[in-house]
Amino acid sequence: MKFGIVGLGWPGQQHVRAIKAYAKEAELTAVCDLDPLKIKEFEGLCDTYSDIDLFFAEADVEAVVLAVPHQLHAELAIRALQLGKHVLIEKPMARTVEECNQMIQAAEEHNRTLMVAQNWRYTPWCIVAKRIVESGELGQIRAVRTEWLLNFRPSFPKGSWIYNGELAGGGAIVSLAIHNVDALRFIVGEIEEVYTNALYTDDWSTNEAENWAMSQLKFDNGAIGHLFTGYTPFFPPDNGMLHIYGEEGTMFFGPYQGENGLWIRSSKRSLDPDAGYERVEIDSLAPQLDGHPQTNQLKHFLDSVKNGTRPETDGRETIKTIELVTSMYASRRDGLPVRNGGKINVGS
C-alpha cells in the first residue's frame, strides 16, 4: 500500500518508522510539511511537498496519514476520503462530535477506511491490562485512577495552535489526556457520568484551553474513577499512569521498586501479606506485538483495509471518546455532573 504522510513532527516520524517496519506491505511514496528542513530529510526517498493542494493533486498514494494540528483534522480527512484515499489520522479524532460525524459520513459514502491513531490501544501493556481485566482475575472493578502530566512548553513554543482552545478543541484534556480517556474506555468500560474541574492559569493559553484539569468518573459497571492531567507542571515525576482496583486484586502501570512496568497483585497469585507486586510479563502474554505501538497500529490498519474489516479505532468507535470529552467540558462549564451524552444529572 502506498502511503503519504502529512505532518512530519514527532507523531509523523513515528508513522514513518512504522511504515519502514512493514516494508513488504507498505511503502512511503510522499510526504508533506511546511518546514523545509523536515522535507529535506526525505528528498530522494519519496516525493516531497510543501503545498497541501499539490500533495492531494499529484501524490501517488492509496492511504494518507494525517499528523496535523487539530483544527485541520476534519477538513483534511474528508478531503482525502473524497479523493478515494484510506485515512489514518492522529488523535484526537476531531475537535467536535459534529466534525467526527462528517468524517464518518465521508468514509462510508466513499467506502474507505477511516482509523484514528489512539496508539495506547495498540500498546502492549494496555492490551495485556485489558485481557487481565476481562479474565476476571481482579474481581469486580471498584475504582480506577489515571493521570498524565507533561510540560508542553519545551515542545510547543508560545503562540502555538495547541494553546488556543478554539483551534485545539480545548486544553490538556483533549490534547494530552485524550490517551487516558480512550484507554479507560478500552480497558475498563464505558463511562456514564463525569464531573470536571479545571484551571486556566497559563498565560500562553487562550480561548478556554485549560492547563490543569481533573474529572471524577462513574463507569457503567458501577466503578468510580479519577482522571488528572496538566500540560504546565513543573518537572512532573510521573506521567501516563493507570491504577485499577478490584475486589480480588490491584493492577497498575507505572514505577515500582525502581522499574517502570505493569504490576499486579491478586488473590489468585498469592495471599501472603508480604508478597508484594508481581511484574506482568508482557512479552510472553503478547508475543505477537511490537514494542513500538505505532507499528502495531499500522499493521492493524493494513489488515483492516486488506480484509475490509472495521478497525479497533474506526470513526464510529472513536467518536465515543470525543463525546466523552465533550461531556467533560460541559461539566466544567456548568459546574455540574454530566451524563455522558450531554444531559446534566442535577440529582447526583
Image: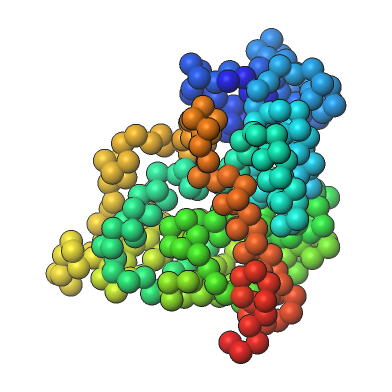
Q: Residue at x 25, y 57 (%)?
A: 278
Give the residue drawn at x 57%, y 33%. 14
Which of these two is toward me, 112 or 163?
112
Left or right relative to 267: residue 71: right
Please determine whether, in this image, residue 158 is positioned above or below residue 340. Answer: above
Percent of width and height locating residue 28 = 62, 19
Spot occupied by residue 159 in the image (x, y as percentages of width and height):
83, 50
Q: Is residue 184 above or below residue 329?
A: above
Which quadrant is home to the N terminus?
A: top right
Q: Is residue 35 visible?
A: no
Instruction: Count every numbered label the image shows and give the total.
Output: 0
Figure quadrant of the C terminus: bottom right
Residue located 57% across and 75% down the image: 193
| Residue 228 falls in image quadrant | bottom right
74 and 252: which is toward the camera: 74
Is 47 left, or right, of 113 in this rendering? right
Would you say 74 lies left or right of 112 here?
right
Q: Position of residue 174 (x, y in %)?
A: 67, 57
Q: Is residue 258 above or below residue 122?
A: below
Q: Nearer the viewer, residue 35 or 321?
A: 321
Residue lying furthest bottom: 347
Name of the residue lying farthest toward the top: 44
- Can residue 332 be seen in the rendering of this structure? yes
The residue drawn where x is 70% and y is 69% is 329
Q: Position of residue 175 (x, y in %)?
A: 67, 54
Quadrant of res 173: bottom right
